[in-house]
Image (tube, rainbow, N blue to C red):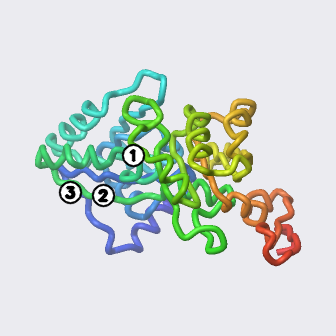
Amino acid sequence: MSNSSDILGACDALPVFEAGWVWLAGAGPGDPGLLTLHTLNGLRQADVVVYDALVDTSILQWVKPGALVDYAGKRGGKPSPKQRDITLKLIDYARSGKRVLRLKGGDPFVFGRGGEEALGLVDARVPFRVIPGVTAGIGGLAYAGIPATHRDCNQAVTFLTGHDQTGLTPDAVNWDGIAKGSPVIVMYMAMKHLETIATKLIAGGRSVDEPVGIVCNGSLPTQKVLETTLGSCAEDARNSDLEPPAIVCVGEVVRLRAGLDWLGALNGRELISDPLGIEGGAGVSASQA
């Protein structure tokens, strides 16, 4: 507590949380250290914190004493609050004069339905602030040693969701166009329909041997990573102990993990300086670096 207070005390420019406002804040992919100062500032001032299932509960240690902590998590296949009810809850808290922090995993505007909640606040004439967060499709991959972009692999990356509002593989996605046009594809919530998605991408021209990385619980101590290929990723995922939430990355950048798995290096993994085989680089462990 004292450490966070010292940090915030040194940042005079951080905003004051006004009564009757809602702050839509991203909590990052899980590691509490990936919180932004704005989100930490909100946690220390909020009267009510409404948080999602993907928010690591250790983050709640920074909630100010006496604040109401309200769980509003949604998990696939389990009883969950409806989105409209969550939005109405935010409105009711704000109208009662509370400082309301809506804490969402990752970034509130990246597959987080933060835009829907914000528009609901606009309709109710409730003032709000948006605090971006580190999204799992970038931060979770980085903790696995997989960069979303690398100039030897890609100049573009596509982020997409693996299911739509009905829970099915999204028909609105132009799978053929993405297969042909995006060198790297980063997918949220894709585990359930991974076999269907892989089939669509292969039908669109992707190689069955293209590298695939699946990162479960990215940035947390329980993080697990599966390196596989597009042709076998669905079967390999079924045969593993991986469970959602997970990020699935398709593309040559996955091969860079052999050189960029910095967490693995801390545990003795030997890293390769040229994982793409362009220059024939040698390996180096964390102790040698």
Q: Residue 259 vs residue 126: left or right? A: right
Mark 1, other Cα within 10 Å: few <14 / some 14–19 / many ≥20: some
Reply above or below: 92 against 155.
above
Of circles 2 and 3, which is in front? 2
**Mark 2 or mark 3, earlier in chain:** 3
Q: Residue 128 vs residue 228: left or right? A: left
Label ID, residue 18 = 3
What amino acid does circle 2 point to?
Answer: Val
Q: What is the distance, in whole Å, between disc 3 and disc 1 at their CAs?
A: 24 Å
What amino acid does circle 3 point to?
Answer: Glu
- Give coordinates of residue 108: x percent, y percent: 37, 51
Determine contact: label 3, label 1, CB under 8 Å.
Answer: no
Q: Which residue is mark 2?
A: 130
Mark 3, other Cα within 10 Å: few <14 / some 14–19 / many ≥20: some
Determine contact: label 2, label 3, CB under 8 Å.
Answer: no
> Residue at coordinates 14% horizontally, 42% vertically from top-left?
95
Q: Which residue is mark 1?
A: 112
Q: What is the distance, in whole Å, between disc 1 and disc 2 at their CAs?
A: 12 Å
Q: Nearer the viewer, residue 94 or 169?
A: 169
Report which quarter residue 260 is drawn in: bottom right
Is residue 245 visible in the rendered structure shown here?
no
- Give coordinates of residue 67: x percent, y percent: 34, 42
Q: Nearer the viewer, residue 84 or 220?
A: 84
Is residue 22 visible in the rendered structure shown here?
yes
What amino acid does circle 1 point to?
Answer: Gly
